[in-house]
Image: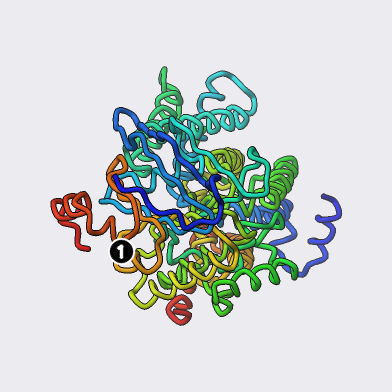
């Protein structure tokens, strides 16, 4: 197993650490003894074939899946037990095209107690505008969520995950359903956000072309960690060749 | 009530001078926001078919209540419908069948059980007809009071839970990542629907009920771009159909519930044309 270089600025304390995390659903062993370190300010990409358990890793971290093992968070300058804020961008194509929910409604539903169907308060509108500005999406505010393109939807979900600005950002397949141009835009944006807010980013993806440029660390899993390191190391590893050539993945 | 009666007596329309029409008119005015609001969330939560099944369960509950000799079987029906929705949620979370299949299973079982109980020992089914077809013209001032209370409860529920319900319905993963207890919220909503459906069943009838719980929001979806318009149009359509349908039934001598449903169907058809124009 290759160990990745440490680009983060957090010294010994890692922002997010998974130790021997296993997940079993029924009789299926979804994850086996997974170990991951996401360092502060790093972008870690989780890759693997379909059904490898990538989303399960994210769900375990989010507390949506029962697991055995240890998931530890630490934020520099904060007490150890203080849970960090996690921003989560779920896997996307889930909005019904007919849902009469505008982008600002979605924000209000997520953030405000005031019923969105009564309209938004001025304060809320300002928050929405500020959040969308972070992802250069000001023009999307009145659009229905079902009518957004793949890239637009990802930007809206990203803006939501960034309000309030989290310590760790988790994205599940943010590049699926996004065209090539949109992918580069989105990754540039993530890179910019990471630098601006000193975010740690953990994402799953099926698109490997952008990894060398943007990912600090790449982890290949297929129920267990097969290989981890820099993008170049992982993409040229025998494990990568074995998993993706035998499985015949399109990428 | 006497104020309401005096107010309608002062109107020039003959149909509003009958006491039963005064009651029905007031009931419709209360039912419009009730069904308008409930239907928005039923449609957004893809529960149209489920609310229909709940109606069947409520009918069975009424039959059970009647057989037990309760004077007002409605409350037995509320309990039965609540039990039905809890059992359904339980089975759904532990089964690999799709929701529509399970709804079919539950719905047909409930209605069969209801008819079986109602007719066991050679009983006559006729007395249950009012729950099947319903009769808003026979609504009593006491029932109108209940209707007002239910409406108030639904409005409070909506104001408190509306955002979380919407989020849980349109994007469950996003909702739970934002700390919304999705199953709990959906369970609470299902229970609320069970109560609304069961109480409404004796006024509008099982056959008509589901159209009132689905059509206002279905039409509103066609012409709305955001949640405010969605809820506004839904209540407006329910109100227009309620008043229009009641009036039509008075002059044509047809069932009021059916007239209201048909008016809603016409509104839905018109809204479809607007959807094309909007897209």
Residue A166: x and y, percent?
A: 60, 56
Q: Residues within 10 Å of mark 1 (few under 14, many from 20)?
A: some
In the picture provided, is B16 more to the left or to the right than A248? Answer: right
Residue at 46% across, 75% down: B275
Residue B25: x and y, percent?
A: 69, 57
Looking at the picture, tell me which residue is in the foreground, B129 or A222. A222
In the picture provided, is A217 more to the left or to the right than A83? Answer: left
Q: Residue B267, can we see it?
A: no
Q: Residue furthest bottom?
A: B277
Say if B89 sits above or below B209 in the image. Answer: above
Say if A173 sits above or below B202 in the image. Answer: below
Looking at the picture, tell me which residue is in the foreground, B45 or B214. B45
Looking at the picture, tell me which residue is in the foreground, A112 or B169. A112
Q: Which quadrant of the figure contains the N terminus of chain A?
A: top left
Which image quadrant for residue B82? top right
Residue B66: x and y, percent?
A: 55, 24
Q: Which quadrant of the figure contains the C terminus of chain A?
A: bottom left
Element assignment for label 1? loop
- Picture mark count: 1
Q: Residue B279, can we see it?
A: yes
Residue A147: x and y, percent?
A: 45, 72
Q: Mark 1 sits on what residue?
A: A207
Which image quadrant for residue B256? bottom right
């Amino acid at each position: 197993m290759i160990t990745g270089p440490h680009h983060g600025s957090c010294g010994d304390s890692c922002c997010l650490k998974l130790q021997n995390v296993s997940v079993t659903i029924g009789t299926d062993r979804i994850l086996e003894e997974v170990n991951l370190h996401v360092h502060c300010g790093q972008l870690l990409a989780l890759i693997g074939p379909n059904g490898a358990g990538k989303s399960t890793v994210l769900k375990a971290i989010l507390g949506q899946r029962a697991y055995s093992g240890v998931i530890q968070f630490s934020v520099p300058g904060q007490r150890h037990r203080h849970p960090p804020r996690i921003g989560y961008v779920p896997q996307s194509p889930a909005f019904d095209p007919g849902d009469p929910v505008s982008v600002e409604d979605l924000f209000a539903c997520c953030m405000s107690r005031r019923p969105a169907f009564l309209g938004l308060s001025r304060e809320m509108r300002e928050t929405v505008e500020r959040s969308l500005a972070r992802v250069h999406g000001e023009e999307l505010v009145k659009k229905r969520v079902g009518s957004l393109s793949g890239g637009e939807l990802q930007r809206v979900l990203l803006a939501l995950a960034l309000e309030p600005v989290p310590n760790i950002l988790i994205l599940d397949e943010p590049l699926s359903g996004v065209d090539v141009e949109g992918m580069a835009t989105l990754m540039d944006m993530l890179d910019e956000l990471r630098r601006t807010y000193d975010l740690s980013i953990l994402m799953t993806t099926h698109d490997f072309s952008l990894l060398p440029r943007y990912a600090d660390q790449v982890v290949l899993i297929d129920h267990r960690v097969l290989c981890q390191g820099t993008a170049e190391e992982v993409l040229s590893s025998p494990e990568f060749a074995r998993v993706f050539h035998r499985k015949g993945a399109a990428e | 009530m006497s104020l309401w009666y005096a107010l309608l007596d002062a109107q020039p329309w003959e149909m509003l001078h009958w006491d039963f029409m005064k009651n029905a008119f007031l009931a419709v005015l209360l039912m419009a926001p009730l069904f308008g609001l409930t239907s928005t969330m039923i449609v957004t939560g893809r529960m149209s078919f489920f609310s229909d099944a709940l109606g069947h369960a409520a009918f069975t509950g009424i039959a059970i209540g009647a057989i037990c000799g309760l004077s007002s079987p409605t409350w037995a029906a509320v309990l039965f419908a609540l039990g039905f929705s809890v059992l359904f949620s339980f089975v759904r979370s532990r089964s690999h069948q799709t929701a529509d299949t399970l709804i079919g299973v539950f719905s047909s079982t409930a209605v069969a059980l209801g008819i079986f109980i109602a007719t066991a020992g050679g009983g006559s089914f006729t007395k249950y007809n009012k729950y099947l077809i319903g009769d808003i013209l026979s609504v009593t001032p006491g029932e109108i009071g209940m209707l007002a209370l239910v409406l108030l409860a639904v409005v409070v529920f909506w104001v408190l839970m509306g955002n979380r319900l919407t989020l849980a319905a349109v994007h469950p993963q996003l909702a739970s990542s934002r700390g919304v207890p999705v199953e709990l919220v959906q369970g609470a909503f299902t229970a609320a629907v069970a109560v609304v459906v069961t109480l409404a069943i004796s006024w509008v009838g099982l056959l008509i009920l589901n159209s009132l719980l689905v059509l206002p929001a279905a039409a509103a979806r066609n012409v709305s771009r955001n949640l405010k318009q969605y809820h506004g149009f839904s209540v407006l359509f329910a109100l227009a159909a309620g008043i229009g349908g009641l009036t039509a039934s008075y002059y044509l001598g047809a069932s009021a519930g059916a007239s209201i449903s048909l008016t809603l169907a016409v509104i839905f058809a018109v809204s479809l044309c607007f959807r094309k124009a909007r897209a």
